[in-house]
């Protein structure tokens, strides 16, 4: 091989090595959670150079690494690559001596986790088969079997059965019956002809409570999101920068109140979402997802109704896959889906088909 050819091959190999090194660099700490006994934590970091922040790409779909950290010894145990960093949030599980992603990743733990702790953890989080509903000093027990629910009173008597959904609303309950029809009940679980009165009795609120202020400041090349925490009568001057958005392509930027300042307290919490208007499409910035992009959004609806590729969804509640999606009636919204037909979706994103 000629000397010149050797140089070209060497440069090519060097570029491949450099690209590989850059592809392994990640940043940030997302979706952090802990082992059942708190000995370990797991979190994701996002690839720094090889994740293009393109429109219509979800933040959680980015590639990166999953990190296992020893909380007792305050050190990183190991890291491995994941195709989507959001998998760290719901695809990893703890066993007595391993952290694993089914059929893909198995990480040995330096110290075992007590199996009893794991069993108790699995039973309590999430609560899968039984839970309580409270209203006006009354308690009801809801039991799930298959796709149907049974509701019992405190004496153990069954008061509702063979229903698909029940949730509390003001002064009563909203129910999906076996025929996937909405019904309403009062606090004593007596069936009503229509929704109960939504007016609330006056409730006391604390006078001097924790208060939050967010603002968007415009500088030469970007918008800086800042936050301050204090009390009702506090003079806010302790702002800290918590995120930023580059100005490129941005037509306008604001919070859900359509202003660049958002103030609220713990008596009336608000979502700390930033809306980015790019003119022909929109972005929604959150701490959980980063920036997600949509063709259009409707911030007058709660949750925020979004549209992408002629399909609809509710931000942070449903996927954007519905042909039609009506506004929420209390805790349920009616939908039409090309593949699954018609039904309802609740505020947790669970679907009930007709």
Image: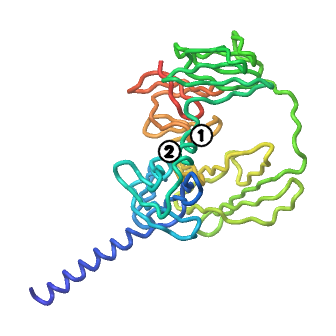
Closer to us: 252 or 113? 113
Crowd around label 2: few <14 · some 14–19 · many ≥20 (10 Å): many
Point out residue 319 in the picture as x, y percentages from the top left corner. Answer: 48, 38
Closer to us: 97 or 71? 97
Res. 339 mark: none
Please give left or right for residue 263 compared with residue 282 in the image: right
Tell me what residue is drawn at x 53 percent, y 43 percent. Answer: 119
Crowd around label 1: few <14 · some 14–19 · many ≥20 (10 Å): few
**Residue 58 in view (yes/no):** no
Closer to us: 21 or 321? 21
Q: Which residue is mark 2?
A: 294
User: Which element type, helix, strand or loop, lies under badge 1?
Assistant: helix
Q: Which residue is mark 1?
A: 124
Tell me what residue is drawn at x 64 percent, y 14 percent. Answer: 158
Point out residue 310 in the picture as x, y percentages from the top left corner. Answer: 44, 35
Tell me what residue is drawn at x 48 percent, y 47 percent. Answer: 90
Figure check: 1 above or below 80: below
Colour style of the rendered protein structure: rainbow
Using the numbered discs, state the Cα–Cα distance from disc 1 to disc 2 in whole angstroms. Answer: 36 Å
Please give left or right for residue 196 compared with residue 349 in the image: right
């Amino acid at each position: 091989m000629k000397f010149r050819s050797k140089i070209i091959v060497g440069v090519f190999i060097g570029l491949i090595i450099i690209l590989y090194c850059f592809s392994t660099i990640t940043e940030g700490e997302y979706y952090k959670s802990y082992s059942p006994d708190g000995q370990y934590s797991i979190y994701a970091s996002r690839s720094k150079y090889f994740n293009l922040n393109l429109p219509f790409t979800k933040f959680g779909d980015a590639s990166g690494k999953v990190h296992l950290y020893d909380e007792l010894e305050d050190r990183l145990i190991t890291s491995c690559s994941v195709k989507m960093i959001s998998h760290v949030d719901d695809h990893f599980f703890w066993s007595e001596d391993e952290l694993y992603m089914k059929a893909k990743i198995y990480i040995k733990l330096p110290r075992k986790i007590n199996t009893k702790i794991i069993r108790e953890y699995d039973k309590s989080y999430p609560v899968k088969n039984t839970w309580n509903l409270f209203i006006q000093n009354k308690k009801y027990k809801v039991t799930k079997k298959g796709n149907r629910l049974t509701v019992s009173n405190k004496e153990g008597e069954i008061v509702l059965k063979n229903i698909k959904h029940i949730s509390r609303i003001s002064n009563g309950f909203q129910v999906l019956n076996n025929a996937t029809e909405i019904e309403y009940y009062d606090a004593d679980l007596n069936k009503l002809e229509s929704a109960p009165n939504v007016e609330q009795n006056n409730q006391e609120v604390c006078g001097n409570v924790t208060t939050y202020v967010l603002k968007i400041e415009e500088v030469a090349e970007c918008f800086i999101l800042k936050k301050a925490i204090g009390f009702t009568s506090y003079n806010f001057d302790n702002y800290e920068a918590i995120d930023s958005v580059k100005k490129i392509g941005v037509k306008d930027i604001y919070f859900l109140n359509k202003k660049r300042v958002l103030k609220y307290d713990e008596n009336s919490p608000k979502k700390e979402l930033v809306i980015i208007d790019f003119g022909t499409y929109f972005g929604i910035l959150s701490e959980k997802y980063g920036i997600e992009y949509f063709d259009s959004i409707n911030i007058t609806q709660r949750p925020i109704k979004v549209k992408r590729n002629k399909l609809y969804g509710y931000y942070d509640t449903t996927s954007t896959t519905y042909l039609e999606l009506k506004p929420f009636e209390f805790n349920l919204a009616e939908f039409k889906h090309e593949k699954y037909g018609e039904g309802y979706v609740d505020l947790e994103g669970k679907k009930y088909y007709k």
